[in-house]
Amino acid sequence: MGSMNLLCWNVAALAPTLKNIALKYGSLSDLFGELELDIACFQETKLVEAQLTKEIVCVDDCESYWAVSREKKGYSGVVTYARGQWRAAHVEVDCLASGESDIDREGRVVVSDHGAFVLINVYVPNAGDRPARPRLGFKLKFLHALKRTADGFRKQGRQVILVGDFNVVATPADVHASMPFDDLYAPEELAALHALTEGPAAYVDVWRRLHLGVADVYTVWDERTSARAFNRGLRIDYVLCTPGLLPSVVACEVVGTDRLPPKWSDHAGLLLRLQGLAPPAPDQPCALWQRRWESLVDTRQRSIRDMFGARGGPPKRQRRAAGGGVGGAAGGGVGGAAGEAGTHAEGEGVGGSIDTAATAAATPAGAAPHHATSGTDAAPGETAISSAPPRRKPAAVPQEKLRPPGQRSLAGFLAKQQP
């Protein structure tokens, strides 16, 4: 058992962010190394399926699990990268309501099983501008389904971590004094978040638990008004966990602007460090990753090594020693992505900006992927698990039809594990 480092960050469009990362660090893999990351959870990627190239998907020693909007192009989207021994045993995407509801069609959820905990990477909808708030009902439906999903794992005895952009603040301490707290959100929005963070069955707000009484630390600023320069922000990005994980928490900090410069996103990143947890047992890759990898790599192409009898297929899993420290995460405000309460509207298009001040040479992120762990997984919009991953390249079929007959959901699989 060792440490596990997790980054949660709304990137406000991944394509330009990757260019900025390449300029500063060399590649996404180099950023993961600099921050000593085992897991990275990004929100608001704004990528379509056609943009999920090998360079973006296949980062060295990582698997990546993608939820992409099926409603709008260049909209929403979340991804979880899992590295080394912390690659997931099972994964579902857009699965809060069995994959077919409207809340499961915008690329907002990735659920992954990492042995010691179930991780839910989420991008909660924005309710829209006042006074109409046209998506308030949609947002409440999403938050209620999110709680049901997390509670379902909890009832099975699992530890749960929820990370992401929740698009609502928890308390007045999470809002700059220039913005009246009571005018920002509807009472129903606050109640939906507090259903997660308060009461006897609450999920603990890890950053707040470690920084009681701290004010003026935010995770998003309105770029249109240069609010970051005056630190007029909101804290709407959270790491929540079940109380059973608190003894394993070492740190949870806002990443400093020296690591994630303000020009990259209007959101700050959060860096969580845990210790003393066991990663999943090494096994076959989950089916979601297997299919994604096979769609990007021509598994029929023979190498010289193959011609002399070596077996083909994805590279074998290599266990990586648990990482050490967090790599100098700094407290205090950082650049962040979009927020609710009139500070940011979810939008289409590319978003973000390229940091032209960076001087390092750009290099493409990614290299050969490695295996994850046991079981199989669901395609976008579905919740399926089977006992063995496919070993052939699947035919090009709509995402909705990728569920093999008889596959079980992640929740169903976990239920089978209970005595």
Image (cartoon, grey):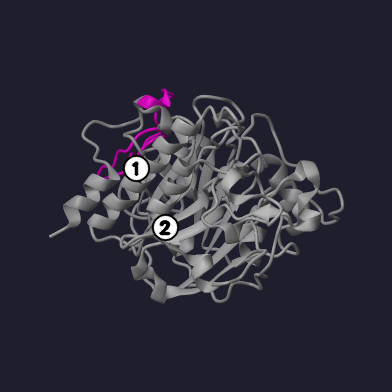
Residue 404 in sight: yes
Mark 1 residue type: Asp
**Which residues are drawn in magenta?**
377-400
Which residue is label 2 attached to? Answer: 197
The answer to whether residue 158 is left or right of residue 191 is left
Which dot marks residue 9? Answer: none
Secondary structure under tag 1 reads loop
User: Residue at 56% of width from left, 25% of height from top?
Assistant: 72
Residue 159 position within the rendered picture, expressed as x and y whole percent measured from the top left: 33, 62
- The verdict on residue 381 being magenta is yes
Q: Residue furthest left?
A: 419
The residue where tag 1 is placed is 377
Q: Earlier in the sequence, mark 2 or mark 1?
A: 2
Q: Residue at x 57, y 76 (%)?
A: 325
* Side of 193 where 361 appears, left or right: right
Residue at 48 percent of width and 39 percent of height: 108
Q: Nearer the viewer, residue 79 or 224?
A: 224
> In the depicted view, which residue is nearer to us: 337 or 84?
337
Asked whether residue 119 is in view, the answer is: no
Between 398 and 355, the one lying in front of the other is 355
Amino acid identity at mark 2: Thr
Residue at 33% x, 39% y is 390
Graded by Cα atoms within 10 Å as few (under 14), some (14 to 19) or many (20 or more), the crowding at tag 1 reads many
Q: Quadrant of the C terminus?
A: bottom left
Res. 49 image quadrant: top right
Give the SS element for disc 2: helix
Q: Position of residue 242 (x, y in %)?
A: 36, 63
User: Which corner quadrant holds the N terminus?
Assistant: bottom left
CB-based contact (under 8 Å), mark 2 and mark 1: no
> Label 2 vs label 1: CA separation?
29 Å
Q: Answer few, some or many: residues within 10 Å of disc 2's Cα (few below 14, many 20 plus, some between 14 and 19).
A: some
